[in-house]
Amino acid sequence: MSLDKALATADESKDESLAELVEELRIPSISTLPQHRDDCRRNAQWLIDRFEALNFETKLIDVVDGGHPVLQADWSVHNNAPHLTIYGHYDVQPVDPLDEWDSDPFDPKVTDDLVIARGCSDNKGNHMATLRAVTAWMRAGGPPVNVRFLLEGEEEIAGRSLPEYLRANAPELATDCVLLWDGGFSTDDSPALTSGLRGMLYVEIETTGAVRDLHSGFGGAAPNPAMTLARVLASLKDTDEHVTIPGFYDDVREPDPDEVSRWRRSEEDELKALFGVDTLVGEKGFGVDERLWVRPTLEVNGIVGGFTGSGMKTVIGAKALAKVSMRLVPDQDPDVILAALDSYLQSMATPGVRVTVRKLEAAPPVLCGYDHAAARAAAKAFEDAFGRPTVLVRSGGSVPVATAFNDAIGAPMVVSGIATKDSGAHGPNEKLYLNNYHGGIEMLIRFMQELADTRS
């Protein structure tokens, strides 16, 4: 049986699978830093070489000026087989703060049970598991489904290349299922399917006063943008953690009760341990899962203004700046929320201080579904590979390209992955458990067979 042969091949080639992952992890494909632009392209070409060795039809596409290329790799078995599109990204986050790493971020440290390196959990371990699953299938005679890979190099910078490519080529990219393999396990380390992703509105709020920084001796007469910004930011939530923007909650859709009944509930102690805190906060009147998954939020991500260096400099800064993110839920519209935020902030401006709101990024929320054939196939494949039931969760974060897949392609979507909640993605000492990596390869092999069986 081809499935048994593919599984045996994957088991026999674990050392090879790990070696390939380590090799890719050595490429510093940091998409946001211009000095690593060539490394991003080198990583894309590294992947192309491996797909071509498997007889995939490949192409590297430059979509927007100054962007990083989209990689497409296709393999077809026959027209009657389901078509599976697999998404991942080869770019990674910067490594700062470097002094908090225990080893070189791009010289992977491998122990008996894990690998430590930038990008191992987000997303190279994930997409290498898909590549190694396909490798095992090819050595066993070929996957039982038609497969397309779409890998991008701009996920970490919310880039435009892949979304524009999807929208411009939607008819040619039609598929039966999209596997967004950029998620992970639940907080109790169970395999998880994500039924929904919160959207995002990310803005910059700038307050400006005098034409230049002023001596603080002018205090009492000079407008103070930093004070205004502090007052404005503090007013965006009340003491019960409710967002105070007028109309902010008007379009919030309640989750389906059947879905809620199937959630794997988070344990507050697990989250406290993960965060390293003794108290959780959030909107009054809702449990932690509702607050993380189906309620919108507003968070201040950073503030700067005036003099912030060591020592003294008594000035009233001419301007102050804050970065603010809002996680949105169905059916909130980022543009509607942006307009409401801007109007609200203007109403709170103080004399002599101008308030400017700039949208930096926006993505609507996405519902993935959890009871379609592809989701059921993934759940069974996970359980067979890991020996424990697959749980249902939502994601508090966003995968911006999910919106483009949803709008342009419209195929059933499966959102999952093999990273764990304690992976440290985006931070120092990012890690991936090897059992999850090899188990993920097995799951993906089984998933392709389960998906093929839906047509039999």
Image (tube, rainbow, N blue to C red):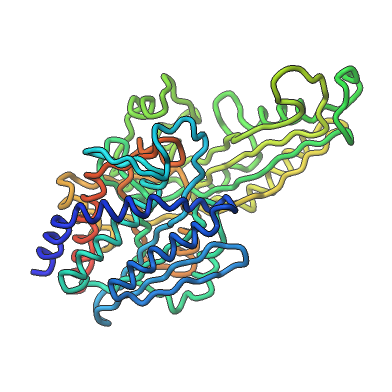
Q: In this view, does 294 lie above or below 353?
A: below
Q: Quadrant of the C terminus?
A: bottom left
Q: Pick out the residue farthest to the left.
A: 1
Q: Is residue 67 left or right of residue 344?
A: left
**Picture coordinates of residue 214, whole percent (x, y):** 88, 26
**Picture coordinates of residue 71, whole percent (x, y):** 44, 67
Q: Can residue 209 be seen in this view?
A: yes
Q: Can residue 454 be seen in this view?
A: no
Q: Residue at x 91, y 22 (%)?
A: 221
**Picture coordinates of residue 336, whole percent (x, y):** 64, 51
Q: Is residue 340 above or below residue 87?
A: above
Q: Residue at x 61, y 51 (%)?
A: 361
Q: In which quarter of the image is residue 149?
A: bottom left
**Residue nearer the viewer, 368 or 57:** 57
Q: Is residue 71 left or right of residue 37?
A: left
Q: How many labels does the image show?
A: 0
Q: Which residue is drawn at 31% across and 53% down?
A: 21
Q: Is residue 345 above or below residue 313?
A: below
**Residue nearer the viewer, 373 or 429:** 429
**Picture coordinates of residue 257, whole percent (x, y):** 35, 45
Q: Which residue is drawn at 66% across and 32% down?
A: 303
Q: In this view, does 216 lie above or below 435?
A: above
Q: Quadrant of the N terminus?
A: bottom left
Q: Is residue 409 left or right of residue 22?
A: right
**Residue nearer the viewer, 24 or 379:** 24
